[in-house]
Image (cartoon, rainbow, N blue to C red):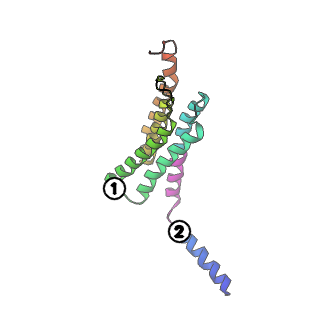
Amino acid sequence: MSTSDAFFTVVLNTVAKELSDLPDPEQATRIVFKLLLAAVLGGLLGFERETSGKAAGLRTHMLVAMGSAMFLTIAQLLGISAQDSSRVMQGVIAGIGFLGAGAILKPAKESEEDVKGLTTAAGIWFTAAIGVAVGAGEESAAILCTILALIVLMVGPWITKDRPPKK
């Protein structure tokens, strides 16, 4: 065996060992299912926001839900306790808060009280909560929360459309 063959054998064996964290197809299927479900649920909320002309749309909501689900899934794969998983959730919640803060805009003029992006920020935050639920294995709760959020986003504007703005 030549030196280059030995080198590539070592490289391939090392890569194989690094990818051995999924010991069986069941675990791989579980991860793929969680990520796909999070993407679909986040995508539903994102699609509604995008069709409403909002800045944070389909891709943003899908990535937020998938990322949140993945953080909890990683924690589970590492064997972290439920108490330690709550710390992961706290980190996700705080991190998404920064993302949501970037979606909120306040006009520069002091006299204007029109703040924009609060619903978008709340939607991103809620999408992260849905992703966390999926990642924690609470898929039914995540589906129910998505349905309820869609109802709020679709019915809310309809309820308030004929009301005059507050002064």
Q: Is residue 139 visible?
A: no
User: In terms of depth relative to the viewer, which is nearer, 71 or 57?
Assistant: 57
Q: Which amino acid does label 2 sit on?
A: Glu
The stretch drawn in magenta includes residue 127:
no
Mark drawn on residue 126: none
Label 1: which secondary element:
loop
Kindly identify which residue carries mark 1: 81
User: In terms of depth relative to the viewer, which is nearer, 153 or 9?
Assistant: 153
Mark drawn on residue 18: 2
Report x, y in % for residue 47: 59, 33
Q: What residue type is labelled 1?
A: Ser
Q: On the rendered structure, is 133 left or right of 103?
A: left
Report x, y in % for residue 5: 67, 82
Our reading of the magenta stretch's main secondary structure is helix
Report x, y in % for residue 105: 51, 32
The segment highlighted magenta reads 18-37
Label 2: which secondary element:
helix
In the rendered view of the protein, which quadrant contains the C terminus? top left
User: 53 above or below 99?
Assistant: above
Residue found 63% across the figure and 81% down from its top: 7
The stretch drawn in magenta includes residue 33:
yes
Report x, y in % for residue 27: 49, 57
Determine the CA span between mark 1 and mark 2. 24 Å
